[in-house]
Amino acid sequence: WAGGKRQLLNKLLELKPNSFNRYFEPFIGGGALFLELAPKEAHINDYNQELIAVYKSLNDKKSFNELYRLCKEHEALHNEQYYYSIRALDTQKGYSKLPIAVRGARCIYLNKACFNGLYRVNAKGFFNVPFNGKAKVKLFDEENIKALREYFQNNQITITTGDFASAVEEAK
């Protein structure tokens, strides 16, 4: 995820408290620190609803299976024309009512198939990053996505989208 915390991970880990009960992450992004800590109970949030659709899909068995299937479909159908057709989905009426797995798989696909993995929208809120020009894309590592699903399934992770202040209201 562009702008992620992975490069700062060692420094962030030095600053973490020795113990905590519930982890709060108001700007989840790619989840580098969250996944490194792998807390048993957490509240994760991001203002980006498309990114949150990915996390919510990981947290729901039915949605996960559909996300997985759709990502494989995106990989198989990938080309420039297909990329632009998927990119244009958010301009269609009713897009926000699509299942989270559809929106989550689209988010993953666009992230891997767009130029430099950027997430950028125009003034109307439509994704507008150009195609990366690659003939093939790999949307995820099999072991990694299954481990993520297992982590979400076996822990208490609350997932929200919205203002960061609301996401940390319960933090102590």
Image (tube, grey):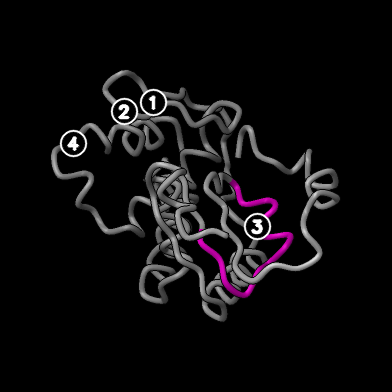
Residue at horizontal 77 percent and vertical 54 percent from the top: 16
Q: Which mark is residue 121?
A: 1
Q: Give the image location of residue 167, x and y in percent.
A: 45, 52
Of badges 3 and 1, nearer the viewer stands 3
In the image, residue 51 above or below residue 69: above
Is 63 magenta? The answer is no
Asked if disc 3 and disc 1 are in contact, CB closer than 8 Å, the reply is no
The residue depicted at 29 percent of the width and 32 percent of the height is 88
Along the line of sight, the residue nearer the viewer: 155 or 144: 155
Work out whether mark 2 precedes mark 3 in sequence or the reverse, and give the earlier one: 3
- Quarter of the figure with residue 19: bottom right
| Mark toward the start of the polypeptide (2 vs 1) | 1
The numbered dot on residue 126 is 2
Q: What quarter of the picture does the N terminus occupy?
A: top right
Q: What number is the disc on residue 34?
A: 3
Mark 2 vs mark 4, CA separation in Å: 10 Å
* Amino acid beneath label 3: Phe
CB of mark 2 within 8 Å of CB of mark 1?
A: yes
Real-space CA distance between mark 4 and mark 3, rounded to the nearest whole angstrom: 33 Å
Q: Which residues are magenta?
A: 30-43
Residue 150 percent location from the top left of the image: 58, 77
